[in-house]
C-alpha cells in the first residue's frame, strides 16, 4: 500500500512538473522585431513598451530593428520566426495593402495577431483659405469637377493613398476624380498643401495637428468611428453618411503557428503594458493614439481591413 | 601614373556598363497614364549620361595612356589581397550566424592586419581591442544581438 | 524642456575627442570618422546623435591641422591648403604657437559661421515654407550642378553623380510605386540603405586601398618635445590672440567666404581653405596670414554647410549628406518640419556648435595635440584592421540584416575602383541623397501639371532659381575656360579641388 502511495505521489509530482513546464512560458529573453528603422514611430512604441512588458512577463525584451526592403525584411522575419513565442514583432498597415502584399508575398495571414496597440486615424486636411468649409462641400465639388483637384499624403500605393481611394469609392467616385500626387511622406505632403501644390492632404490627425493649431490648415473630417477626443468639433465621415474609416496601425504579432496559449499570455501582457501611465504619457507626447484590441478582435480587425482594401482594388479596378 | 590610367579605364568602363544596364533594364518598367514615361524616365536619363561620360573618360584615358605607352597593374600581390578581403566579406553572414558578433569582428580585423603584414604584437593588440570594443559598445551599450 | 541633457553633453565631448583623433591622424578622414560612428549613433536618438555629430565634424576639420603641425601631413584634405606654412611655423617658432594658430582662428571662423548658420537657416526656412516641388526641383538641380563643377574633371564628376543617383533609383519608384532594379530580391525593395553605402564607400574602400598599395611602412616622425612648460600658454593663447587682432579683416573675409563656399552644395571645407589660402598666397601674405585664413575658412565652411541641410534638406557637403541620411533614417524631415516639430533640437544644434567652437576648440586644441602625438605611434596597418572589423559590425548593427553584408562587399569594391580611377566618392554619396530628391520633385511637378514643362517657369521664386542655375553653369563654364587657357592656373586648380572628401 505504501508503495502505491509513493508511486502515485511521484506520478503526481511528475505530472505537476510537466504541466508546470508547459505553462511556464517565458523563461528566456523575448525578441521583439521592429520592421522599421530606429527613431520611427514603430520603433519608439516598441522601445517604450519593452520595459513595461518586461515587468509584466518577467523576462528581458530585446527590441531588434530588422529594416530594409520597405518593411519586407522585418515583416518576413516575424512571419518566418520560430513560432515558440520568443520571436514576436510589431506589424503595420502594410500587411493589408494589396500592392505591398503582391510585391513581398507577405500578407496578414502570415501572422498570429497578439494585440492591436496603436491606431492613428487619418484626417482630410485642407489649406486655411480653401473654398470648402465642410466635407460635404468638398464632396459636392469633387463630383462636379472630377480631376480638377489634387491630393497627397505619402508615396503612390502608400497607406494614405488607400485612405483616399476608400474615400473616393465610398462617395461613388473613381481614382481619377481626385488624383494622387506622390510625396515622400506626410511632412512633404503638408508642405505641398501649404505652398499650394496640392488641394487636399490625407495624413494622420497627429501629423497635421501642429499646422492646424497654427491656423495654416483645417481639418474637414476624420476617418474614425467616433469623434476624436482632442478635436471634438470635427465630424467623422460616418456622421456624414459615408461609410469609411481608415487608420494606420501598429499591432503586436507572432509567427503564424504560435501556440494559442502563448499568444494569449502575450496578449494579456500587452493589455497590461499599454495601460502603464509612463507609457501612456510617452505615447501622448509622440502623438500616437493607443487603442488596444485583444487577440480575437485583432484577428477580426486584420481580416476586415484586408477585405476592405481588396474591395477597393476590385471596385476601382486598380492595377499595380 | 600608369596604374591610375588603368583604373581610370576600368572606372569608365564600369560607368558605361552600369549606364547600359540601366537603359536596358528600365525598358521593362511600366508607363504612366497617357503614355508618359514614368519610372523609366530618370534611370534612362542617368543611363545616357553614364554611357556618354563613361565613353568620354575612356577615350581620354586611352589617348593619354597611349602617350605613356601601355598600362600596367602595379603590385599583383596588392590586388590578390584586395580581392581576398572582398571575397571574405561574402562569408560574413555565415560567420555571424555561426560564430556570433565578436569572433566575426575580430576575425576580419585580424585578417586585414595580417594581410597588411602587421607584427604579431600588433595583431594581438588589435584582436583584444576589437573584441572589447564590440562587446562594450555594440553588445552591452546598444544591445545588438549576435 | 532642457536643451542640453547630460548625455548630449557627454556625446559632444566624446564626439569631439573621437573627431580630433580621426581628424589629426593622416589617412583617417572626417568622413571616415562619421561613417563609422553613424551605425552607433542611429540608436541613440536625434538629440544625442546630433551633439556627437557636431562634435565630430567641427573638431575633425580643425584637428586636421594637428597632423600638419606634428608630421607635416594634413590630417584631412581640408588642411592640405596650408600644410607647409603651418608646419614651418611650428618648426621656426614653436609647435604651441602653430597649434594656437590652428585653434583660435578655427574657433573664431566656426563662431562667425554659426552666426550665419542661425540667421541663414531661419531666413531660409521662412522662405522654404512657400516652396513647392518646382522650387525644390531647381534647388536640387543647383546642388547637383555645383557639386559636379566642384570636381576638377567634369566628366568624372558627372559619372560620380550619375552612379550615386543610379544606385539610389533601386527600390520603389516615386511616381508609380513600382519596384525598380530589385531583381526579385525583397531586400532591395526599399532601396540601398544609405548608411550601408556610406560605410562601404568610406570605410571598406579605404581598407581595400591600403591593402592594394601594401601597408605604407612609413613611420611618422613625431615631435618629441611638444610641451614646454609655461611658455605654452603664452604662445598658444596670448600670441595667437595678438595675431588675430592684427588680422581681424582677414578673419572676417575668410569666415564669410568659407561660410558661403560651405553653403554651396558639393563644395566643402577643403575648397574653402584652398580659395582663402591661395588668395592670400597670391598677394604675398606671410605664413601666419596664409595659415590663419585657411584654417578660419575651413571651419566656417563646416557651419555654412549646415544651412541648406537644415533649412532645405539639401546637403552642403559630404559631411552634411551623411547627416541628412541619418535624419531620414530617424524619420525626421529637414526643412520647415524640423524647425516646427523639433525646435528644441534646432536650438540644441546651434548650442552644440557654440560650445564646440568656444570651449572645445581653444581649450581642447592643445590637449588633443598631446593625445594625438601619443596615438601616432599606432601603425596604420593596425588601424585599418580595426576599421574593417568595425565596418562589418556596424553594417550588421544597422538593420540586423545579413543581406547588407553582401551589399557592403559589392559597394566597397565599387568604391575602390572609383577611388583608384580618381572619381570623387564624396560626389557619389551626394548623388545618392540628391538623386531621389531630383526625381521626386520632377515627377511630382509633372503629375501635378499633367506634363506641362512651362510650369517650372511660372512661379516667381522658381524663375529666379532657374536663372540661378543658368548663371551658375555659365559662370563655371567661363571659369573653366579661362583656366583651360592658362595652363599654370589649371595646374593649381587641379590641386585645389582634390577629389575625395
Image (tube, coloured by chain):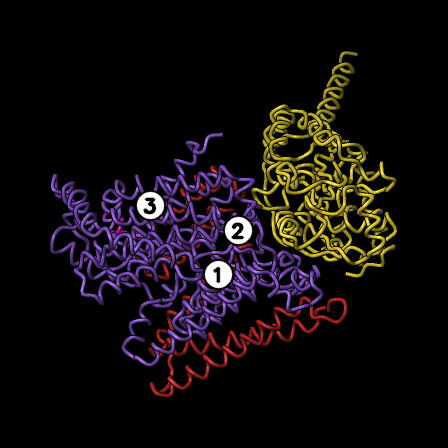
In this rendering, the count of numbered labels is 3
Kindly identify which numbered label has been placed on residue B84: none
Q: Can I make out residue C355 in this image? A: yes
Report the residue marked by disc 1.
Answer: C429
Disc 3 sits on a residue from what chain?
C
Give how far across and how far down residue C122 sits, in percent. Answer: 47, 46
Say left or right for B140 vs A101.
Answer: left
Chain in purple in the render: C
Whether the magenta-drawn stretch holds residue C385 is answered as no
Q: Residue at x 55, y 76 (%)?
A: B17
Say left or right for B42 vs A311.
Answer: left
Q: Residue at x 48, y 71 (%)?
A: C158
Depth check, mark 2 against mark 3: the one in front is 2
Say left or right for C368 vs B65.
Answer: left
Q: Is residue A286 above or below residue A8?
A: below
Chain in red in the render: B
Q: Who is closer to the viewer here, C265 or A41?
A: C265
The stretch of residues the image draws in magenta is C374-380
Kindly identify which numbered label has been placed on residue C127: 2
Report the residue marked by disc 3.
Answer: C111
Depth check, mark 1 against mark 2: the one in front is 2
Chain in yellow in the render: A
For the residues tagged 2 and 3, is the chain the same?
A: yes
Amino acid at each position: 500500500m505504501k508503495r502505491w502511495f509513493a508511486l502515485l505521489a511521484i506520478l503526481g509530482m511528475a505530472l505537476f512538473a510537466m504541466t508546470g513546464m508547459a505553462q511556464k512560458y517565458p523563461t528566456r529573453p523575448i525578441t521583439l522585431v521592429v520592421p522599421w528603422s530606429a527613431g520611427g514611430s514603430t520603433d519608439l512604441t516598441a522601445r517604450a513598451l519593452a520595459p513595461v512588458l518586461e515587468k509584466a512577463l518577467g523576462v528581458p525584451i530585446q527590441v531588434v530593428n530588422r529594416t530594409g526592403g520597405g518593411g519586407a525584411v522585418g515583416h518576413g522575419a516575424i512571419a518566418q520566426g520560430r513560432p515558440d513565442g520568443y520571436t514576436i514583432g510589431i506589424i503595420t498597415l502594410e500587411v493589408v495593402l494589396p500592392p505591398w502584399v503582391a510585391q513581398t508575398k507577405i500578407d496578414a495571414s502570415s501572422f498570429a495577431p497578439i494585440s492591436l496597440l496603436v491606431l492613428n486615424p487619418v484626417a482630410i486636411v485642407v489649406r486655411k483659405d480653401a473654398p470648402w468649409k465642410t466635407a460635404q462641400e468638398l464632396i459636392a465639388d469633387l463630383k462636379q469637377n472630377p480631376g480638377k483637384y489634387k491630393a497627397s499624403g505619402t508615396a503612390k500605393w502608400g497607406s494614405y493613398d488607400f485612405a483616399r481611394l476608400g474615400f473616393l469609392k465610398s462617395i461613388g467616385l473613381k481614382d481619377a476624380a481626385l488624383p494622387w500626387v506622390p510625396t515622400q511622406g506626410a511632412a512633404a505632403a503638408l508642405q505641398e498643401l501649404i505652398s499650394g501644390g496640392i488641394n487636399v492632404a490625407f495624413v494622420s490627425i497627429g501629423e497635421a495637428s501642429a499646422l492646424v493649431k497654427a491656423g495654416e490648415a483645417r481639418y474637414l473630417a476624420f476617418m474614425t468611428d467616433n469623434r476624436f477626443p482632442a478635436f471634438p468639433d470635427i465630424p467623422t465621415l460616418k456622421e456624414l453618411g459615408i461609410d469609411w474609416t481608415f487608420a494606420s496601425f501598429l499591432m503586436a504579432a507572432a509567427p503564424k503557428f504560435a501556440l494559442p496559449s502563448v499568444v494569449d499570455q502575450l496578449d494579456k501582457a500587452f493589455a497590461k503594458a499599454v495601460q502603464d501611465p509612463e507609457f501612456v504619457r510617452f505615447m501622448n507626447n509622440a502623438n500616437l493614439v493607443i487603442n488596444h484590441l485583444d487577440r480575437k478582435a485583432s484577428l477580426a480587425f486584420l481580416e476586415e481591413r484586408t477585405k476592405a482594401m481588396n474591395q477597393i482594388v476590385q471596385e476601382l479596378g486598380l492595377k499595380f | 601614373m600608369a596604374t591610375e590610367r588603368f583604373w581610370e579605364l576600368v572606372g569608365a568602363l564600369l560607368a558605361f556598363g552600369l549606364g547600359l544596364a540601366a537603359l536596358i533594364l528600365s525598358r521593362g518598367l511600366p508607363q504612366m497614364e497617357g503614355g508618359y514615361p514614368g519610372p523609366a524616365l530618370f534611370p534612362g536619363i542617368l543611363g545616357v549620361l553614364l554611357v556618354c561620360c563613361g565613353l568620354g573618360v575612356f577615350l581620354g584615358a586611352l589617348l593619354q595612356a597611349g602617350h605613356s605607352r601601355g598600362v600596367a597593374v602595379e603590385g599583383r600581390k596588392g590586388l590578390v589581397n584586395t580581392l581576398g578581403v572582398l571575397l571574405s566579406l561574402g562569408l560574413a553572414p555565415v560567420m555571424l550566424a555561426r560564430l556570433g558578433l565578436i569572433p566575426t569582428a575580430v576575425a576580419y580585423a585580424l585578417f586585414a592586419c595580417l594581410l597588411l603584414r602587421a607584427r604579431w604584437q600588433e595583431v594581438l593588440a588589435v584582436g583584444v581591442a576589437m573584441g572589447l570594443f564590440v562587446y562594450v559598445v555594440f553588445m552591452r551599450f546598444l544591445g545588438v544581438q549576435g | 524642456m532642457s536643451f542640453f541633457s547630460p548625455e548630449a553633453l557627454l556625446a559632444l565631448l566624446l564626439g569631439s575627442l573621437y573627431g580630433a583623433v580621426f581628424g589629426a591622424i593622416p589617412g583617417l578622414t572626417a568622413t571616415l570618422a562619421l561613417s563609422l560612428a553613424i551605425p552607433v549613433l542611429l540608436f541613440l536618438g536625434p538629440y544625442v546623435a546630433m551633439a556627437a555629430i557636431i562634435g565630430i565634424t567641427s573638431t575633425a576639420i580643425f584637428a586636421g591641422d594637428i597632423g600638419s603641425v606634428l608630421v607635416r601631413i594634413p590630417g584631412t584634405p581640408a588642411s592640405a591648403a596650408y600644410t607647409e606654412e603651418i608646419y614651418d611655423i611650428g618648426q621656426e617658432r614653436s609647435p604651441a604657437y602653430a597649434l594656437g594658430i590652428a585653434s583660435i582662428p578655427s574657433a573664431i571662423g566656426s563662431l562667425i559661421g554659426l552666426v550665419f548658420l542661425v540667421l541663414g537657416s531661419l531666413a531660409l526656412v521662412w522662405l522654404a515654407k512657400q516652396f513647392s516641388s518646382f522650387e525644390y526641383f531647381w534647388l536640387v538641380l543647383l546642388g547637383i550642378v555645383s557639386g559636379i563643377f566642384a570636381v576638377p574633371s567634369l566628366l568624372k564628376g558627372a559619372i560620380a553623380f550619375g552612379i550615386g543617383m543610379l544606385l539610389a533609383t533601386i527600390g520603389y519608384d516615386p511616381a508609380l510605386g513600382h519596384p525598380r532594379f530589385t531583381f526579385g530580391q525583397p531586400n532591395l525593395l526599399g532601396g540601398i540603405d544609405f548608411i550601408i553605402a556610406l560605410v562601404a564607400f568610406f570605410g571598406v574602400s579605404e581598407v581595400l586601398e591600403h591593402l592594394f598599395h601594401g601597408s605604407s611602412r612609413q613611420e611618422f616622425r613625431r615631435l618629441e618635445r611638444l610641451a614646454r612648460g609655461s611658455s605654452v600658454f603664452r604662445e598658444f593663447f596670448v600670441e595667437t590672440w595678438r595675431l588675430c587682432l592684427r588680422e581681424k579683416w582677414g578673419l572676417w573675409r575668410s569666415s564669410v567666404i568659407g561660410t558661403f563656399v560651405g553653403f554651396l552644395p558639393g563644395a566643402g571645407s577643403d575648397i574653402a581653405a584652398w580659395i582663402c589660402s591661395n588668395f592670400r598666397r597670391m598677394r604675398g601674405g606671410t605664413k601666419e596670414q596664409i595659415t590663419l585664413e585657411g584654417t578660419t575658412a575651413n571651419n566656417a565652411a563646416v557651419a555654412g554647410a549646415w544651412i541648406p541641410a537644415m533649412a532645405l534638406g539639401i546637403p552642403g557637403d559630404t559631411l552634411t549628406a551623411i547627416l541628412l541620411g541619418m535624419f531620414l533614417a530617424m524619420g525626421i524631415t529637414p526643412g520647415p518640419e524640423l524647425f516646427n516639430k523639433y525646435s528644441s533640437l534646432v536650438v540644441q544644434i546651434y548650442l552644440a556648435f557654440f560650445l564646440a567652437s568656444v570651449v572645445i576648440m581653444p581649450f581642447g586644441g592643445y590637449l588633443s595635440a598631446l593625445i594625438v602625438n601619443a596615438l601616432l605611434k599606432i601603425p596604420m596597418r593596425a588601424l585599418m584592421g580595426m576599421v574593417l572589423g568595425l565596418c562589418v559590425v556596424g553594417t550588421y548593427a544597422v538593420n540586423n540584416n545579413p543581406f547588407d553584408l553582401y551589399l557592403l562587399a559589392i559597394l566597397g569594391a565599387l568604391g575602390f575602383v572609383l577611388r583608384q580611377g580618381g572619381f570623387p566618392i564624396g560626389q557619389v554619396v551626394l548623388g545618392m541623397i540628391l538623386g531621389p530628391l531630383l526625381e521626386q520633385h520632377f515627377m511630382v511637378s509633372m503629375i501635378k501639371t499633367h506634363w506641362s514643362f512651362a510650369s517650372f517657369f511660372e512661379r516667381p521664386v522658381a524663375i529666379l532659381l532657374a536663372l540661378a542655375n543658368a548663371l551658375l553653369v555659365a559662370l563655371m563654364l567661363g571659369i573653366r575656360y579661362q583656366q583651360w587657357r592658362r595652363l599654370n592656373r589649371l595646374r593649381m586648380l587641379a590641386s585645389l579641388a582634390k577629389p575625395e572628401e
